[in-house]
Image (spheres, helix red, strand yellow):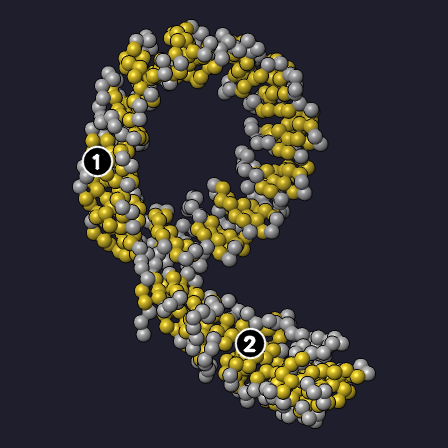
Amino acid sequence: MRMKYFLKGLIYILPIVFAFSLQAEDFKLFYDNGKVGLSDTNGNVVIPAKYEQLGWSNGLHTPNNNVIGYKSGEYWGILSLDGQQTTENYYTRLYPAGDNLYIASIKGKLTGRDFLGLINKQGKSVLPFKYSSIELTGLRAIVGIKYGRSYQYGVVDLGDKVIIPVKYKDIESLGNLRFSVQDFENKTAIFNDSGKQVLGFELDSISSFKNRYATIFANHLRGIIDINGQIIADPIYKEVRYEKEPETKIFDQWQLIKGTETILAWNFDDIEPYGVDRYKVSANGKQWLIDRDGKSLTPKEYSFIGSEINGKTTFQMNQKWGILNADGSELLTARFDSLIIINDVFYAKIKDEWSLYDSFGIKKSNQTYDEIGKRSGYYYPVKRKGYWGFINRAGEEILPCVYDKVGEFEHNKVVVKFHGEYGIIDKTGEWAVYPRKARLKIINADLYLAMDSRLTTLRSFEDETIYFTENKVDVKENHLLEHLTDGGLWKIDFNGRIVNRDIPSQRFDEIRPSSDELFAVKQNNRYGFIDNQNRLIIANRYENVGDFSEGLVAVKILGRWGFIDKQENIIVQPLYDEVSAFNGGVAVVKYKTSYGLINKMGKSVSSDNYEAITYQNNGRYLVKRNGKYGLLEKDGSLLVNAKYDSLVDLGNGKVLVSLFTKFGVISDNGVDIIPINFDGLVYDARFEEYLAMKKSSWVKVTD
């Protein structure tokens, strides 16, 4: 990008000697009585010391084509090296631009602003004094004119004939007879020396040249241009390179396969099923949506597309966020710093201020907020200037932002913190419980808990005390659970009565959650089971226990695992280092370093020399042997031999497998369906189709 600002005057010459050369002769500046002159290396005066400065207004001091600039008073002119003034001191700026040509500026009479022109060393005007910038490139000049605070650029010849109109954001020379032209939408075109477009405004940018070539960028696409400005590879590629000779690489090919037939083929970095009948595709950091025919549903300029929520999704472009409809149209344009979809509303932030929008993209909140919290009942907590309140779905503040903190609406009431104390208000802002030091919790429409460091009190909103205790209390659906100091539990109804001790009250080191109506308990470092009447059903004699499943529970004796029933009969002998719970009459067991499956009689139903066995959601088992994967049926019978690098049971009679970094699909009895020769493979359960990928390779650019 060209610099838009220019030096306003010369760099002042310090009182030291500057040495430079012109062809075979050397010159140096000398000073006399505050004035500067020019002498050769033998000390012979070439130009007498009678000028404020010698050199050029850009700070250089070297003669150019046997002339040098001089400053007398406030203005610059040109001297020949024999001391003759070839131009008057007329210019506010002056410096060499090319062969016998000089950029000069004069001050406008009305504006007082400098205007640049081009002159020869005799002072004859080559380009008129009307430009804000001039850059020579061969027999052309890239010129700029300032309009307000911005610049517009064009190209003229050395007779000031317009080659490219002065109306573009930027122009740069690409070498022989080519120009890169950028419009105000930041798109770039290529023009030739005659002003004809070689390529329309399709490019985003052009890289620096390397080894005589540069990369041209068009959104997610790449191409190559040479030093002469010729496009040798159109911008249709994923990557280009030219370290030795120009080469291109297309995007990876994705095939849509139905059964065994390829229906369509596309070229992207990635593709994934999206929504009901669309796909999200990615290429060189850009994402967009396509339909099943490959037609683009969105622009190809998004840097990110999120997951679909209720037919809407967030997208990002130019570091701003917007919202898309299900058909790919923009509901909210990308102008937000942050956007969050929560159910059927959007939280939108610009700078540090949040607003609420509805599902039609209409702004609902009348104010902007520091934060908007998760919906509570029918209302949204909002924070402004450090204080919290609530708005409704229409964006109206039903409770002003005056509270230190707010909780969630429950039974049309909400706990708030106000001036450091806790209270409860209704949706009109009326106090149901006036502020106090104790923390508060709403139980139901009639009751609440007040909790301080010492006492927990169950109270009604009519200000009646129902129950109080110094013990820890848990709130359940229709009662309180009080933890006694002896390790027991009391069930307290909402009338404050102890209604039942139906949970073990004896002190234990550990009580686990109920498992088939029994509680595993630990006492004296041994486990057993009790019922909800605190009766010991299975004695505390086991080193560890699992959970009951299908009438059996895993128990550990002398470092080994087996299974017992509720009558404490040993059903499976304790022989194993690890066991799982029974599922479908089968359990995974480990003996030493090998895994296998047993039934409820303890009989092996599979090979027992697997490195790992993992239960799948469909009831089958993924097995691993020698680093390879296979598949077992629910009863432990072998479906697929353990010979694949990876394996995914699709649950439809087909299995996605990989071998030696290649992917394919086999039936669940091991028959090939899609050959194992793809570099990537995705199953699309919506249509029972597959997206299969083959990587692209580098290809040399040919003439």
Q: Quadrant of the N terminus?
A: bottom right
Q: Nearer the viewer, residue 288 or 465?
A: 288
Residue beneath the point at 67% across and 40% down: 386
Q: Circle 1 sits in a helix, a strand or a loop, which is it? A: strand
Q: CA distance from mark 1 to mark 2?
A: 70 Å
Of the two numbered discs 1 and 2 on the same chain, state the one appearing first in sequence: 2
The residue to which callout 1 is attached is 641
Q: Residues within 10 Å of mark 1 (few under 14, many from 20)?
A: some
Mark identifier at residue 388: none
- Residue 577 position, x and y percent, is 33, 21
- Residue 470 position, x and y percent, is 62, 14
Mark identifier at residue 153: 2
Q: Circle 2 sits in a helix, a strand or a loop, which is it? A: strand
Q: Quadrant of the C terminus?
A: bottom left
Q: Is residue 164 left or right of residue 518?
A: right
**Residue at the front extreme?**
42
Up/down of 657 relative to 447, above or below:
below
Q: Quadrant of residue 643?
A: top left
Q: Amino acid at mark 1?
A: Asn
Q: Quadrant of residue 698?
A: bottom left
Q: Is residue 362 left or right of residue 554?
A: right
**Residue at the top extreme?**
535
**Residue 280 visible (yes or no):** yes
Residue beneath the point at 76% across and 86% down: 49
Residue beneath the point at 37% across and 58% down: 296
Q: Is residue 89 left or right of residue 189?
A: right
Up/down of 260 relative to 497, above or below:
below
- Residue 687 position, x and y percent, is 27, 46
Do the residues bearing badges 1 and 2 touch, measured as CB atoms within 8 Å?
A: no
Q: Residues within 10 Å of mark 2 (few under 14, many from 20)?
A: many
**Residue at the right extreme?**
33
